[in-house]
Amino acid sequence: MDKSILIIEDDLEMAKVIAEGLKEEDYVVSVAYNGGKGLEMASTGAFSAILLDVMLPALDGYTVVRQLRARGNATPILMLTALDSTGDIVTGLDAGAEDYLTKPFSFVELLARLRALTRRGKPQPVHFRIGDLVMDSASHTVMRNGSQAALTKTEYMLLEVLMRNAGHVVSREEIVRAVWNSRTAIEQNSIDAVVKTLRAKVDQEFSERLIHTVRGFGYKLARMV
């Protein structure tokens, strides 16, 4: 079984203690000390699980989870945080994390949670279907009425955000966090331009349009009956 673990934790001492403990258990450990670096490492490396703090500089843990899931990264994530309210836990799980462990915690419990995650393995690739629009995150393909749409990476990520939230308005701010690095300033017309090209590829040739602008709020992918 692969035992490669990524720790994303800005508390250097805690990261060191966890990493040393895991190495004694024969795990291969990589560490990132902020959300931006953690997102980069998680996106480019193959890990059996990610231990992710919530209160991180650059990008918080919730944003890291959302962006990873929006990009089709299905690595199991265990969130580590001092935030222990029900709302905080629900936010983490809804963002896409598999489990949640509040600080302080025992290392024995951390190991048990980690073993449970790695036994499950990576979740199966996500397969979205909204009417005749189908997205397969394993192959990163999008089909509309049986025809494949050739999307750029940015268009694909935007469409996945909309499909994950089908029937609900996704704000421009949420789109920027999920599709672009949230530290990067994105002009409104840049978002509009990507939406325009995405519409041309998945909506333009069909009588029933799926992508709708909700003026003053953002965009919504309509659910087809």
Image (cartoon, grey):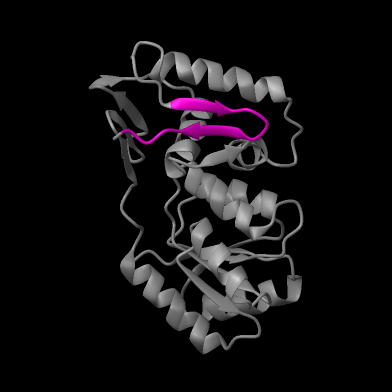
Residue drawn at point x = 54 percent, y = 16 percent: 196
The magenta region covers 211-224
Which residue appears at 56% of the width and 64% of the height?
92
If the image is split into quadrants, where does the C terminus sit? top left
Choose top left, top right, bottom left or bottom right for residue 16.
bottom right
Residue 198 horizontal side relative to residue 32, left or right: left
Choose top left, top right, bottom left or bottom right for residue 151.
top left
**Residue 191: x and y, percent?**
63, 25
- Look at the image and say whether residue 85 sits in the magenta stretch: no
Where residue 106 sits in the image (x, y, percent)? 57, 89
Above-or-below relation of 25 to 204:
below
Q: Nearer the viewer, residue 153 or 130?
A: 130
Question: How many dots with numbers?
Answer: 0
- From the top left corner, tell me how far across and down residue 87 is, in percent: 60, 70
**Lateral position of residue 157 relative to residue 176, left or right:** left
Q: Relative to 117, is 14 on the left or the right?
A: right
Q: Quadrant of the N terminus?
A: bottom left
Report the residue that reaches farthest toward the left. Answer: 146
Task: Name the residue rendered at 28%, 32% in the picture.
Answer: 131
Compared to residue 183, the image places residue 188 above or below, namely above
Decide if residue 51 is in sight here. no
Residue 195 in percent (x, y) is at: 55, 22
The residue lying at 63 percent from left, 77 percent from top is 85
Q: Answer whether residue 177 is visible to the viewer in this image.
A: yes
